[in-house]
Every structure is written in structure tokens, then in C-alpha cells.
Image (cartoon, rainbow, N blue to C red):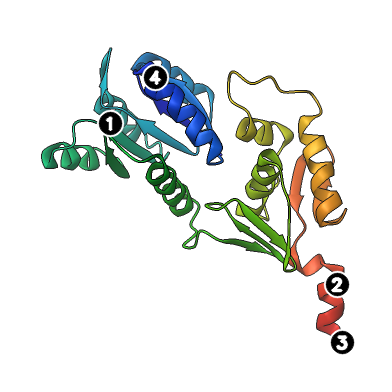
Amino acid sequence: MRILVVEDDGILADGLRAGLGMAGFTADVVGCLEDARAALAANDYAALVLDLMLPDGSGLDLLRELRAGRAAVPVLLLTARDQVGDRVAGLDAGADDYLGKPFDLDELAARLRALTRRAEGRASGRIVHDGLELEPAARLASFDGRPLKLSRREFAVLQALAERPGRVLAKSDLEDRLYGWDEEVESNAVEVHIHHLRAKLGRDFIETLRGIGYRLRPQESSPSRSASASS
């Protein structure tokens, strides 16, 4: 899941990139409003982590711009300004959540999962589809009750497809989800991840729509489940 972090403290920014990466997020990090505007114009992010006190202005200005333009990206304010009045101003300006500094990285990751889950219309953190079960918080996966051993990026690909199983995701959509600015993407990286997943889930569990992208097979097309239903 790709997110944008707007934080001008270099040490904290590096820590957020690394820590959120370990939690399953791909984090692009910028340090000012100008770079944040450029990043948001060029990319589709699942969430935005926004500091308030930035070298070229207040994060609230960017937040108000986004909401005035009807941008629906979930926004979590992350700032040392943690008085009640600051929190109220931020939430009233359109923020979805607020976390004061210092903070616990596990809590930040949990709040981001909750924000993105609500944005996708899911009430539960567990993702279930046709025998597949994913627990993003714990990075656990199983298929027909059998635990799956997945790499970080295999899990991310499978999560992206399982969150909206009827939607076709293009190769470029999956690349954007998996890789940040500073990561080199090999031309066949997505195909390799899909190949490995099919080896663990069955060759037909992930469908290829030629020239369009990938999706999880519809549940009603599962041969084993159709057979059991008719018996």
C-alpha cells in the first residue's frame, strides 16, 4: 500500500519510511508543501501522513486545498502541536485522524490501516475471498486453512487484488503500490510475483486479462467450490 509522508525532519522521515515499510506500506517521503503538491498531482496514494509545521507553510493549508478540490485521500495529521484546539482545527479542516508527537510506530501503522480500510468500505481488518484469508496487521495469510508463506511484496500484491476482488488491476497499478520513488523496478517484477503466488494458490486463482491486468477469479468460478455446491 503506497502512502505519502510529508515530514521535514530528516531523521524522523527516514525512520518513518523504514518503519512503515516493515509494516507493509510503501512510503514516499517529502519535506515541504511544494514537493507534496507535486507528489499528489503525479500519484494516487492510499493515505497521506501530514506534518503541520513545514518550512514553506502549514500542513493545514494543503489539507484545505485537498478538501476544497474534493480529494478524498485519507489524511492523518502527525505533529507536535497536540493541544485540543490544534486537534479540533485539524479535524474540522478535513483530517481523518490526528496523532501527536512523540508517537508509537505500531499505533501509526494501525491508524493507517483503519483509515484505508474505511476508505475501501471494509469494516473488518481481515480480508476473505474464496478460501483466501489475509490479516494485514499481522502479515498472515492462509488458503483453505493452510498457512501461506509469502514475501513482503507477494503479500502486497495479493492484498491489493483481494481488497477489491472484482476489480482488474493493471501492471502499472501494482508497480505503483509496491515500489517507491527510490526503488528500481525490474520490467518483469510483477509477473514474477504473480508466478510465485500462482504456485502457492493454484494457476487459476489469479486471472490475467490480456492487455488489461490481473484480478482474483470470481468466487462462483472456483471449480472445487462449484463441485461441492452441486453434490
Q: Residue at x 85, y 40 (%)?
A: 210
The residue tagged 3 is: 231
Question: Which circle marks residue 11 in the picture?
Answer: 4
The residue tagged 2 is: 224
Q: Amino acid at mark 2?
A: Ser
Q: Amino acid at mark 3?
A: Ser
In-front residue for pair 158/122: 158
In-front residue for pair 172/100: 100
**35 versus 26 height, above or below:** above
Real-space Cα distance between discs 1 and 2?
Answer: 51 Å
Real-space Cα distance between discs 3 and 2?
Answer: 11 Å
**171 versus 216 height, above or below:** above
| Sequence order check, earlier mark of 4 and 2 | 4
| Sequence order check, earlier mark of 3 and 1 | 1
Q: Residue at x 69, y 19 (%)?
A: 184
Secondary structure type for disc 2: helix
Q: Residue at x 41, y 48 (%)?
A: 115
Real-space Cα distance between discs 4 and 1?
Answer: 27 Å
